[in-house]
Amino acid sequence: MTVMNRNTAATAQAAAGAHTLQQRYQALLEGQHESSAAWLAAQLAGAAQLPDDLPDAPSRLPAWSAAHAAKVAAGYAEYLEQRRQGAPRRFFANRAHALWFLQQVAPTKAVDGAWLHSTLQHWRDPRFHGLIRTYLEELGNGDPRCNHVLIYQRLLGRLGCTEAMPLDDTRYLQGTLQLALGRHGDDYLPEVIGYNLGYEQPPLHLLITTYELAELGIDGQYFQLHVTIDNAASGHAQLSIQALRQLCPQHDRQAFYARVRCGYRLNDLGIAAPDLIRQFDLQAELFAALERKRVYGQFMHADRCRLQQRTINQWLAEPGAIPAFVGALQAQGWIRRGQSPADSRWWSLIDGPAAVMFGVFNAYEKQLWHDWIADDWRPHIRRVAPGSWGLPNAQGALSDSLAGDDPATLIERMAGNRHATPDGLLATRAYIRTTGLLQEEPR
Ligand SMILES: [Fe+2]
Ligand SMILES: [Fe+2]
């Protein structure tokens, strides 16, 4: 439902103004939100011009959501059938491709749920309880094992993707929108409801991503979790429609719903996940990563290291020489593409604790090398069960003596930019106790 060129307005605005999206995002993460209200208003004005696929009357939303879920299920069944008949992976050609994608969407995942922050203060009003429940679940109810932001951070950490990779500025658009909606939600309740409505309907690409990550041996707990927790029957998708029904004022339904639709359309700003995934170019990513590293490597090699009569330092001193350098490694027989990387002398220099270049390349860069060398050669990949970290019920394991805290203070500490810190997690648990909003477990 997203069209690629919809981000042009946002990009042009970012370029024209004093701030890039990344700067806005960073400022909001640091709790500075001075110009974000005007920026959000401009984004919504842009979204007002866009089409959407919502029904004309909110009363038809349950049927709309059910039809969406059925379409996703049918699309997924078709995907699985294609795979059963031997079709290749639809999204990720190799592991490097998947790691690249996980880093591209990291700015959004790092603020998962942020758009709902302002609902917390309405804990006395039962009409808000569905949205608050959604937000608390994004926060893992204050349990670091279940906090979505932390689950994603751990995933990137395990994959060695912790160095910030330079990203296109538009990668910061959705995260900035989410933080801004969370900050200004009091003025934009219908828009928050609409954004939430769009974000919480599980899309087909989520199912395919989950499946293919597991196939590539990557723990997809984060994605698997959203397949289940956002479900349309009883999950966040269902709560999002219920919230709209309960909070839509009787006297002004049309105007309220028109604003809901604008908020919904904010989901379509920027690039849709499947289009983003298609942008990956393995060789270009490898060369770009080497170019970034080149600057540091040009003085690090002894002069006896030579390749085609030039020292390694001479090769690396020259901007843009990476493709020729890699070509020379191939010509010299140090890299044999299309075979197991273990057959390449170059790979033995960079991989393994005893390798002479141990630690020069991070896990992501090594994966780029690995997959570029392997090319069409396919390793045997082990499937991991999604969610091997598990989602324990941990309320009992974490006890804090903060009951009685002032909710307003707790709420401030649970904002989208703070809830994943130890203090934010503590505040979340105290908030749940203070407000009595803990979901009881069956016993
Ligand atoms: Fe989430
Ligand atoms: Fe959700």
Image (spheres, helix red, strand yellow):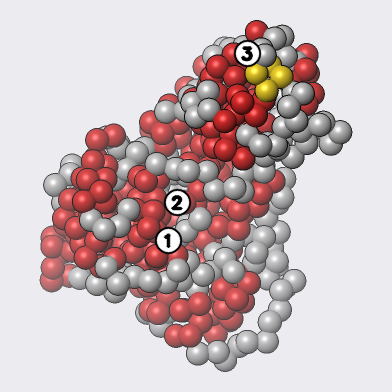
| Horizontal relation, residue 188 to residue 70: left or right | left
- Who's the residue at 65% across and 52% down the image? 154
| Horizontal relation, residue 348 to residue 46: left or right | right
**Type of the residue with mark 3:** Ala
Disc number lying in front (3 or 1): 3
Q: Mark 1 points at which residue?
A: 26
- Residue 441 in view: no
Q: What element carries label 1?
A: helix
**Looking at the rendering, which quadrant does residue 129 occupy?**
bottom left
**Looking at the rendering, which quadrant does residue 402 occupy?**
bottom right
Q: Position of residue 256 (x, y in %)?
A: 18, 63
**Nearer the N terminus, badge 2 or badge 1?**
1
Mark seen at residue 108: 2
Question: Could you give the CA–CA distance between mark 2 and mark 1, rounded to whole angstroms?
Answer: 12 Å
Q: Quadrant of the C terminus?
A: bottom right
Q: Position of residue 55 (x, y in %)?
A: 21, 46
**Does the beta carbon of the residue at mark 2 sit less than 8 Å from ligand 1?**
no
Q: Where is residue 180 in the image (x, y as percent from the top left)?
A: 34, 64
Question: Could you give the CA–CA distance between mark 3 and mark 1, rounded to whole angstroms?
Answer: 41 Å
- Who's the residue at 38% across and 71% down the image? 32
Q: What element carries label 3?
A: helix
Q: How crowded is mark 1: few (under 14 residues within 10 Å), some or many (20 or more)?
A: some
Question: In terms of depth relative to the viewer, which is nearer, 331 or 201?
Answer: 331
**Type of the residue with mark 2:** Thr
